[in-house]
Image (tube, rainbow, N blue to C red):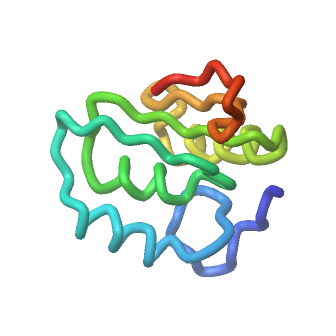
Amino acid sequence: MRAPRRRGCPRPYHHHGHPTIAAAIARLAGVRPEDRVVNLMSGSGTLLVERLLAGPAAVAVAVDNAPEAVAATTDNLAAAGFGRTARVDHADVLSPKGSWRA
């Protein structure tokens, strides 16, 4: 799951996908310090990292059911300086018997 750092990429973390698009999504959605942000099926955590790079949030949580994704998101949040700011949960949010809550 861990992506290599791309040569010449200014992002301080490893990512899959397109961090530029993730950054644009965060800014289009609006950034307020009172936001409660949840990145469901977080993968490598690109959306949550880019949202936090755009500005602070009251609560920031990433959730994924794959242990590899949880590890990648945890590593990437730490690499971007948000290791203590955001929570990463290993859970299946689609399971009717699941216990995960935002």
Q: Position of residue 5 (x, y in %)?
A: 71, 67
> From the viewer's perspective, is 57 left or right of 88?
left
Q: Is residue 18 above or below residue 50?
A: below
Q: Position of residue 18 (x, y in %)?
A: 55, 76
The quarter of the image holding the N terminus is bottom right
Q: Is residue 62 above or below residue 84?
A: below
Task: Count the marks.
Answer: 0
> From the viewer's perspective, is 7 left or right of 87?
right
Q: Quadrant of residue 96?
A: top right
Compare residues 2 and 39 and report the one nearer the observer: 39
> From the viewer's perspective, is 78 left or right of 86?
right
Residue at horizontal 53%, vertical 28%?
87
Question: Hey, which residue is sitting farthest top in the picture?
Answer: 99
Residue at horizontal 50%, vertical 71%?
19
Residue at horizontal 54%, vertical 31%?
83
The quarter of the image holding the C terminus is top left
Q: Is residue 71 above or below residue 45?
A: above
Q: Position of residue 3 (x, y in %)?
A: 77, 64
Q: Position of residue 80 (x, y in %)?
A: 51, 47
Residue at horizontal 68%, vertical 79%?
7
Compare residues 63 and 94 and report the one nearer the observer: 94
Question: Hey, which residue is sitting farthest front in the picture?
Answer: 96
